[in-house]
Structure formats: C-alpha cells, structure tokens
Amino acid sequence: MSRLFNSLRGQLVLLIIGALVVAQSISLWLFVDERSLAVRAAIGAEAAGRAANIALLIEEAPPELRTSILRAADSPLVRFEIADEPTVDHLDHFDGGAVEARIRTLLGPSDTRDVRVELHKARSVLPSNSNAESIASHTHPKLMHDHFSAIEMTLSIELRDGQWLNVDTRFQRPPLQWPLLSTLSFGITAAIILAAVCWYLLSRLTYPLRRVSEAAERFGRGENADLLPETGPREIQELTATFNQMQDRLTRFAADRTRIMAALGHDLRSPLTALRVRAELVDDDETKNAMISSIEEMQEMVETTLAFARGMAVSEPSESVELGSFLIQLKHDMLNSFVFNDEDADVTLRVRPNALRRALRNVIENAIRYGGGADVSISRGQDMVSIEICDDGPGIPEEEIEEVFEPFFRLERSRSRETGGTGLGLSIARTLLRASGGDITLSNKPEGGVRARISLPTAS
C-alpha cells in the first residue's frame, strides 16, 4: 500500500480526491447555511403573519374573548400577551425590515400604527404557562437533537385602543437531515467512480513516464533499447524525444570510440611487425633481445586493446543469470584457482554474461597474481548485489587506488610482462561493469591485502 501511494499516480489520485472532498465540504457548509437562512426567513414570515392576524382578530373580537384568543394562539415557541407598554421599547431594529413589511402588508396598506421588531440570539426556551406547554417546550430541543441555537424575535404591535400586542417567538437552526444510508451509498459510489476514472486517466499519463524509466534502466545495463514512441501529453512527448536523442547520441559516441580503438590497434600491427623483422637483423644479441622484448610487449598491448575493442563492439544481449551458479562455473573454468564462499547464494542478475565473465576473470587473476590468491563472496543490498574479491597481498598505496584503473598503469615498475601484465585488466573490467550498470571499487583491508567490490544491479 505504501508503494502505491509513493507512486505519482497514487499521489495524484489522493490529491484530486482530497481537493474534491474539501470543495464538497465547503459547498455543503454553504448549502446548509443557505438552507438555514431560508428556513429561518420562512419561519419569521409565518410568525409575522400569525402576529398580524392575531392583532386583527383581537381588535375585532369582544374584550371578554381576548384571553381565550391569546391562550389558543400560544405555543411552546410563541407567546402572545396584551400590555400597556411595548416589549420592544426602542426603535432600533436589527434585520427586522422584512418582518415589519410582512406585518404591515397584512394589516393593510393604509394602516400607520407603530410596529416594532427586534431580533437577537437566544439559547433558552420560552417560559411556559402550563404543565403541558412546559413539557412540549423542553421536548422540542430533544427532538432537534439538542442543536438548539435559537434566534429570538420580539414583536410589539400597537392596537387601536392604545394597548400593545407583544409577541415573543423563537426558532432554531434546522439540523442537517441527510439519511445516513443514502449519504454512505452516495459517498461510496462517488468515491469508486471517481477513483476508477482518475486511475484510468492518470494511468495514461504515467505509463509513458514508466516506459521512459524502464528504457533508461535497460540502457544503463548496456541493453539495446528501441526508440520509444512519443505519446501522451506534450511535456511527456518532449521528455521521450529528448531521451531518444540522448540514447542515439551515446550509442553513436560509444560506437565511434570503439571503432577508433580498433582501427588504432589494427594499424599498429604493421609497424610492429616491421620492427620485429628489423630487430632480427641486429647483430648484437643483447640489443636484439631487448628490442624484441619491447616489441613483443607492445604487440601484447595492441592485441589486448584489439580484444577489448572487439568485446565492446559486440552487441551481446543481456540475460538473467543466477549469480551463485555463474561463479561456480567460472571457478570450474579457471581450474579452481580461487575460493568461492557462497555457493548456495540465490541471487538473480540481468547482465551480459560474457562481459561479466571477462571482468570477473580479470579482477580474480589480478588478485591471484599480486595477492597470492582470491576469496570471492556475495552480499546483497536492497537494489544492488556486491561481489567481493579479497587477497592477502601487500595492498595498494592509497594515492594510487584510483590510478590502477587507468589504461596501461601498472604498480609493478619493472615493466616485465611476466610480473606486470599490460595494465589493461582493471581498466577493461571497470569499463565492462559500468557498461552493464555496475561498478568496481578497491580498498585496503585493515589486516592487509586488497578488497575489490563489484556492484551490480539486481534483476527487475
């Protein structure tokens, strides 16, 4: 699961879903607030109409019926009373214009009596005048799930006889009434559809990127990779085109360098052969032997260079090999000249077998020649496999550890072909390993000797 959400596709899906959730939450909050305002306005208009009608009814009814009318009009959230003084004793109205206009419309267009409206927040229920009303007034908030954030509206309407009809009414924010099952089914369906659509569309976006990544990995391992089709968004097409150009340029550069090395080595054969013939004509045996020895050393270097160039020019396909079996076979081919400590190792690599065999042979032969023997072992990391080749020789001066990878560099200063070789072994090994996506490093062991560590990427 963590690997999924570490991918570009997974993170984009999460980003889109998260943004939509936030947007929908804000929209829902705005919708609920607008709904609350609309319901409050409707309740306020109803209370205003009710108060105006009661005022007209009281004025038209006999005085002895006023008490009965008020008792019948009362409810748990609305109280009517007639008094000599208005409850709203000031003319500063807060957002009561619509309510006042509603009352004056019902009273009549020519009615000029004083109508006062006051609005403010309240969190308590109205006092009740009877036991039944008390129970109803306390039960109402429970029915509203205790979400009783009320708005209190007080009305004072002047009657014709000089008295005032005072009305106290309260109404609360209506709760969000969404059925749980419907809400869950809607959310789950929307999430599934949204995730599926996003996953499909983002797959079309990320697939070209993954294809470029896989091609780069294959090219880094030395495999031949075909040109990638330029598909997807414009930026992805530009990236693919740039990768194709880079791959073509690097391939041509490596091929040109290899051809130059091969041509140089081939052209050196003719003058060396001529020198060898002339050296045979020298009368002084000591001079002749010295010249022949030098010429033969140069010929060996040329042959090694040609072999190296031919090996680099060969387009060997990569294969999946089991490293333990591969080293056991190499040990057998080298007549058991080294010790392999991990014959049961189970590690699969994607390499060019002949190139890896040649690189390992060069390093192992180097350890045997200068260190008196070679111990080979395997250690595995997360994405890389290390092959360690250790010897018990005198080691390498720290300032020359990197120089030994330079072509024709030799620690053995006598320049003898029997003891010093040509100085191309480690250079060839590093070139072959780097062409396969790996590398080689050298270090001195604390107890003496050299440790060569070959790092290779594991098979995908």
Image: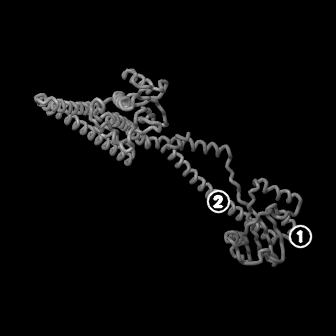
Helix, strand or loop for disc 1: helix
Dot 2: few (<14), some (14–19), or many (≥20) neighbours within 10 Å? some
Specify whether residue 351 is in view.
no
Q: Position of residue 264 (x, y in %)?
A: 19, 36
Looking at the rendered structure, which numbered label has been put on residue 241? Answer: none
Q: Position of residue 116 (x, y in %)?
A: 74, 74
From the viewer's side, name the closer residue of 424 and 384: 424
> Measuring 70% from the left and 74% from the top, which residue is drawn there?
93
> Measuring 34% from the left and 43% from the top, which residue is drawn there?
243
From the viewer's side, name the closer residue of 344 and 395: 395
> Measuring 31% from the left and 36% from the top, which residue is drawn there?
412
From the viewer's side, name the closer residue of 365 and 394: 394
Specify whether residue 96 is in view.
yes
Q: Position of residue 451 (x, y in %)?
A: 43, 35
Looking at the rendered structure, which numbered label has been put on residue 64? Answer: 1
Relative to 77, is 264 on the left or the right? Answer: left
Q: Is residue 32 above or below residue 85?
A: above
Name the quadrant of the N terminus: top right
Name the quadrant of the C terminus: top left
Which residue in the structure is indicated by mark 2?
A: 33
Residues at marks 2 and 1, CA–CA distance in whole angstroms: 45 Å
Quarter where residue 366 is shown: top left
Helix, strand or loop for disc 2: helix
Q: Earlier in the sequence, mark 2 or mark 1?
A: 2
Q: Position of residue 165 (x, y in %)?
A: 80, 72
Amino acid type for the residue under numbered disc 2:
Asp
Relative to 380, is 335 on the left or the right? Answer: left
Amino acid type for the residue under numbered disc 1:
Glu
